[in-house]
Amino acid sequence: MPSVGIVAPKTHRFSEPLVLQSGSMIADYSLMYETYGQLNADRSNAVLICHALNASHHVAGVYADAPDDLGWWDNMIGPGKPLDTDHFFVIGVNNLGSCFGSTGPMHTNPETGKPYGADFPVVTVEDWVNAQARLADVLGITQFAAVMGGSLGGMQALSWSTMFPDRLRHCVVIASTPKLSAQNIAFNDVARQAIVSDPDFHGGDFYAHGVVPKSGLRVARMVGHITYLSNDDMAEKFGRDLKSDDYQFGFGVDFEIESYLRYQGDKFSSYFDANTYLLITKALDYFDPARRYDGNLTQALHMTKAQFLVISFTTDWRFSPERSREIVRALISNRRRVTYAEIDAPHGHDAFLLDDERYMNLVRSYFERIRLELKVAA
């Protein structure tokens, strides 16, 4: 399938302060975003894509000066692809606190003239959704045809359905959860502790010291990456294969899986911001829309109006199918229209980024239904 081709990011600056869930506020901030396809005359074909932990606004296509930098969901979005940009206007937004263009810890704090660093306020999924809604206002989009995301992006999509129920007609939640389990919170805290314990972290103000806490970032990524893969996938790709002919009887790299994880950690530490990692994992931990309803998810979703597509993968042990079924049961209890699929795929949590034919065809069929709805409405 063809790509959307060469794309260019855009930036919008907001001067009006954004009040955060914590009670703090951030003023004079910018959001970076990209768009693909054409917005129709009545602005009814817009689809918002919400990104996961280490992704960004660069959802599809390539940059003129970086032809190898393919958008992270390019297999999903483009002409003739499941989310067809011949019919839909797709928007990818980089979240506040990220390190890919939107205002984050590495940017200058206008109050001090220095990088925010550790002073950047803690943000939540709800804060991101509020910021995205402001950008939608700027683009003149009063209602999305759909809001869609996988993993942490699915949490944002679910939040859109509760915070702005009249501003989306469909909500697509993939490989996600209504809240993190204790085990997931534990993994996140181990990753954060690896970063804050790195001597080069300097309490979050490492920018002033001209260093990067690479060792902490490496370990954080290695821990996280383990949770994205299934045991079967690891066994098939790596097994107990050795890097050399025999054990080295030391503490270097003996096994292929060790080499792979260290490679992933090294690569991640070369481009991702340590403070951003702390912020985003904490936003994951805090997400719990049922918390204000004494843990009752049905009550938390009672204001929703959208139709839903919820997808899970059998080998995803980070956000297991049972967590998606919790969302489905709560929506059905509220008499919402829900399509649910549990796909038997071997790839673990990362399956939402891959090319499983059943998964792709399901998303294609769902967006074809949305397209026909738009056609009838026109």
Image (cartoon, rainbow, N blue to C red):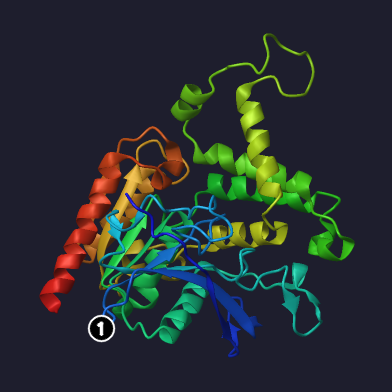
The spot of residue 65 in percent (x, y) is 58, 60
Give, as a three-letter code, the residue at label 1. Ala
Which residue position is annotated with label 1?
41
Instruction: Give the vertical position of 151 relative to 170 (above or below).
Output: above
The spot of residue 2 in percent (x, y) is 34, 52
- Classify residue 127 as left or right of residue 97: left
Residue 20: quadrant of the picture: bottom right
Using the rendered image of the protein, determine whether residue 338 is visible from the camera's viewpoint. Answer: no
What residue is at 54 percent from the left and 53 percent from the top? 69
What residue is at 50 percent from the left and 64 percent from the top? 57
Q: Residue furthest top?
A: 246
- Classify residue 38 as left or right of residue 240: left
Q: 221 or 75: nearer the eye?
A: 75
Instruction: Give the vertical position of 369 relative to 362 (above or below).
Output: below
Q: 332 or 68: nearer the eye?
A: 68
The spot of residue 127 in percent (x, y) is 53, 74
Residue 155: quadrant of the picture: bottom left
Q: Residues within 10 Å of mark 1 (few under 14, many from 20)?
A: few
Q: Residue furthest bottom?
A: 16
The spot of residue 339 in percent (x, y) is 22, 55
- Classify residue 47 as left or right of residue 214: left
- As helix, strand or loop, the secondary structure at mark 1 comes to loop
What residue is at 74 percent from the left and 51 percent from the top? 195
